[in-house]
């Protein structure tokens, strides 16, 4: 029964990783770049929510509402001012640029907010602590169920956006062939900027759950970038969006089961599963070639 | 490999590798290394320690540049070998190996560990390689921090070095660092001048095109991967010899890779001389802004970004491009033959 419990906890944790991985997968699917500052952007989102909560005594779930438009703008300008330029000079430069950005964000956060460890769990109220006791060994924490639910809504919403809206169709067309998309009148630079804006905003939602579920500090970002990237790769790079959520869930389950074997092993177990997937002949669970994005 | 002009189109031009400038500079470089040997005898302890730090930066930069600048492989996980080199030295010293011999063996060990790892990692390019190497470093850090024999999370020290007098310890460490830096820089120099050097530059410029004309891409990359691993391992052992104490979180810290990226981007990605300049800039920046200041790291990341975006060839690469200056004989130059009676151009 503990194993069943572990798998269920792992699936819910996987929803969280999927949420963090979503923006990373969107940007990779579209531009073939990995934003190494993605984890730090999620942490930045958590800090912005923290700032809102200092002025407005409410729940983080409401405090994120003013943060989201800020993050959308931030993502838009990140693409326009930095990534767009780096994309022109091959595959190495975007990696190096975003790595530099990651160091800048971490240290500016430390400068602005001190290295103290914080959590928004208390402000989230009963959601953070409540759980449904199903049997003596099986309980479902409310925050876990909410994380998974929100993750499914995000992935579903993004899927609908990509398949049903004009802007989403432009994104898919640009992902498949940017030059041809340009020929039929799509402004690929605008498409990229919109996608990065969405990716950054989703990262902020991930940051909110990060801040409620556990604690965070200015240097938390890289750990979560690695988890998010592991989820993307386990799902199969260039696969479908839902495969990324599935990858997150596999990572989450690997971590909880690893933690069951030895309390010190969860992260190591996740890394090992990731490396095993890299070693596998197909290099990913689902290796469908760009089904959606 | 030879200093002789290669035969070229008859009577029209020659292909030369050495110029008067580059042979002068190469011998100057050699002389500088010889002169550095005498630094501990002539100069004070502070200078010796400062130069040890600087040389370690040069070594880290040159090795990261070998991987990224010539192999096109951006690694965010070279701290794996920094940590491994340091911890292997401690482990060997605990098993009664002389600590300085242990540093040499630890370097070889890092190269050996990279052999099986290369078969996994070289399947990837770009971001997958970058984060794949990073995950390996993280996994190693966790593994070491769970190992009580290695001091677990609280760290361990190389107490065996206490048996040396502080002054002679500093001197030995300096000489070993100088030896490592000279050896690995020299190895890269020889590698780049060999037949493999041309293949490596072809791989960097366009991997698929290189493969299509018969360049053995993976073999070339593997040699760089092993060299960079052993070099970073040596730098790790030197870091330990300099600080005498290590703990998993700091010695496996991604900040080491941040230093390497800064050094190479500022100096010039894919240039031989660049990392040396970048290492000096990093060293001066640390003196100027203080080693653990937050603003210093902001400046470090910001400068790396600015160079990647606006001056991707770095200080040295840009200088080479603008002036046509080539200090090291690594390329080929086409010149008019002096002896042959070259007919007038039509």
Image (cartoon, rainbow, N blue to C red):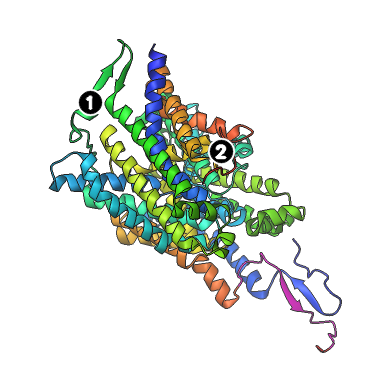
> Front-most of A111 and B317?
A111
Image marks 2 and 1: residues in contact by CB distance under 8 Å: no
Mark yes or no: residue A79 visible: yes
Determine if the magenta segment contains residue B341: yes
Q: Chain of mark 2?
A: B
Label 2 packing within 10 angstroms: few (<14), some (14-19), many (20+): many
Residue B198 position in % (x across, y down): 70, 59
Residue A10 lies, in percent from the top left, at: 40, 25
Chain ID at mark 1: A
The tag on residue A279 is none
Drawn side of residue A40 relative to residue A120, left or right: right
Magenta residue span:
B326-343
* x and y, in percent, of residue B145 in the image: 40, 29
Quarter of the image with the N terminus of chain A is top left
The residue at 70%/70% (across/down) is B18
Residue at left 38%, top 44%? A39
Prevailing SS of the magenta stretch: loop
Q: Secondary structure at mark 1?
A: loop
In-image side of B210 versus B156 (left or right): right
* Picture coordinates of residue B26, whole percent (x, y): 62, 66
In this rendered view, identify the residue nearer to me: B218 or A90. A90
Q: Where A155 sits versus A186, above or below? A: above
Vertical position of residue B193 compared to residue B218: above or below = below
Is B342 a magenta residue?
Answer: yes
The residue wearing badge 1 is A129
Q: Which residue is mark 2?
A: B110
């Amino acid at each position: 029964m503990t194993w069943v419990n572990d798998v269920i906890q792992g699936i819910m944790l996987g929803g969280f990783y999927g949420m963090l991985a979503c923006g990373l997968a969107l940007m990779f699917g579209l531009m073939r770049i990995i934003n190494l500052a993605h984890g730090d952007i999620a942490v930045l989102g958590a800090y912005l929510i923290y700032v809102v909560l200092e002025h407005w005594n409410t729940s983080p779930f409401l405090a994120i509402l003013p943060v989201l438009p800020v993050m959308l703008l931030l993502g838009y300008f990140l693409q326009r001012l930095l990534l767009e330029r780096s994309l022109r000079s091959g595959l190495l430069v975007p990696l190096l640029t975003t790595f530099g950005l990651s160091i800048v964000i971490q240290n500016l956060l430390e400068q602005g907010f001190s290295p103290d460890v914080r959590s928004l769990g208390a402000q989230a109220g009963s959601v953070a602590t409540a759980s449904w006791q199903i049997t003596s060994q099986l309980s479902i924490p409310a925050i876990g169920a909410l994380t998974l639910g929100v993750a499914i809504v995000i992935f579903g919403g993004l899927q609908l956006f990509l398949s049903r809206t004009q802007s989403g169709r432009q994104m898919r067309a640009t992902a498949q062939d940017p030059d041809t998309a340009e020929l039929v009148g799509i402004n690929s630079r605008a498409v990229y900027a919109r996608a990065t804006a969405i990716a950054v905003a989703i990262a902020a939602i991930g940051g909110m759950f990060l801040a409620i579920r556990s604690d965070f500090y200015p240097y938390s970002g890289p750990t979560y970038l690695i988890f998010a990237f592991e989820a993307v790769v386990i799902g199969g790079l260039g696969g479908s969006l839902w495969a990324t959520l599935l990858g997150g869930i596999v990572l989450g389950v690997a971590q909880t089961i690893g933690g069951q074997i030895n309390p010190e092993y969860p992260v190591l177990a996740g890394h090992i599963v990731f490396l095993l997937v890299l070693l596998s002949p197909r290099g990913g669970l689902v290796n469908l070639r760009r089904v959606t994005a | 490999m030879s200093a002789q002009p290669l035969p070229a189109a008859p009577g029209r031009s020659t292909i030369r590798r050495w110029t008067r400038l580059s042979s002068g500079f190469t011998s100057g470089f050699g002389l500088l290394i010889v002169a550095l040997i005498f630094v501990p005898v002539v100069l004070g302890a502070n200078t010796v320690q400062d130069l040890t730090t600087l040389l370690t930066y040069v070594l880290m930069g040159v090795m990261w540049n070998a991987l990224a600048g010539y192999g096109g492989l951006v690694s965010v996980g070279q701290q794996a070998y920094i940590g491994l080199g340091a911890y292997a030295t401690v482990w060997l010293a605990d098993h009664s190996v002389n600590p300085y011999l242990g540093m040499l063996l630890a370097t070889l060990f890092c190269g050996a560990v990279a052999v099986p790892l290369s078969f996994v990692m070289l399947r990837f390019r770009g971001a997958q390689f970058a984060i794949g190497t990073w995950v390996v470093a993280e996994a190693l850090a966790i593994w070491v921090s769970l190992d009580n024999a290695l001091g677990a999370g609280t760290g361990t020290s190389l107490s065996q070095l206490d048996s040396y007098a502080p002054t002679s310890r500093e001197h030995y460490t300096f000489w070993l660092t100088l030896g490592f830096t000279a050896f690995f820089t020299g190895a890269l120099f020889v590698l780049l001048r060999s037949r493999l050097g041309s293949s490596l530059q072809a791989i960097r410029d366009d991997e698929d095109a290189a493969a299509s004309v018969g360049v053995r891409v993976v073999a070339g990359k593997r040699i760089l991967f092993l060299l960079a691993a052993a070099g970073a391992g040596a730098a790790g052992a030197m870091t330990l010899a300099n600080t005498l104490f290590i703990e998993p979180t700091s010695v496996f810290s991604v900040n080491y890779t941040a230093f390497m990226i800064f050094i190479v981007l500022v100096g010039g990605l894919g240039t031989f001389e660049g990392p040396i300049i970048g290492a000096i800039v990093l060293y001066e920046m640390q003196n100027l802004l203080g080693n653990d200041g937050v603003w210093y790291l902001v400046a470090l990341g910001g400068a790396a970004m600015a160079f990647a975006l606006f001056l991707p060839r770095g200080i040295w690469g840009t200088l080479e491009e603008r002036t046509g200056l080539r200090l090291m004989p690594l390329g080929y130059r086409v010149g008019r033959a002096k002896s042959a009676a070259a007919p007038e151009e039509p």
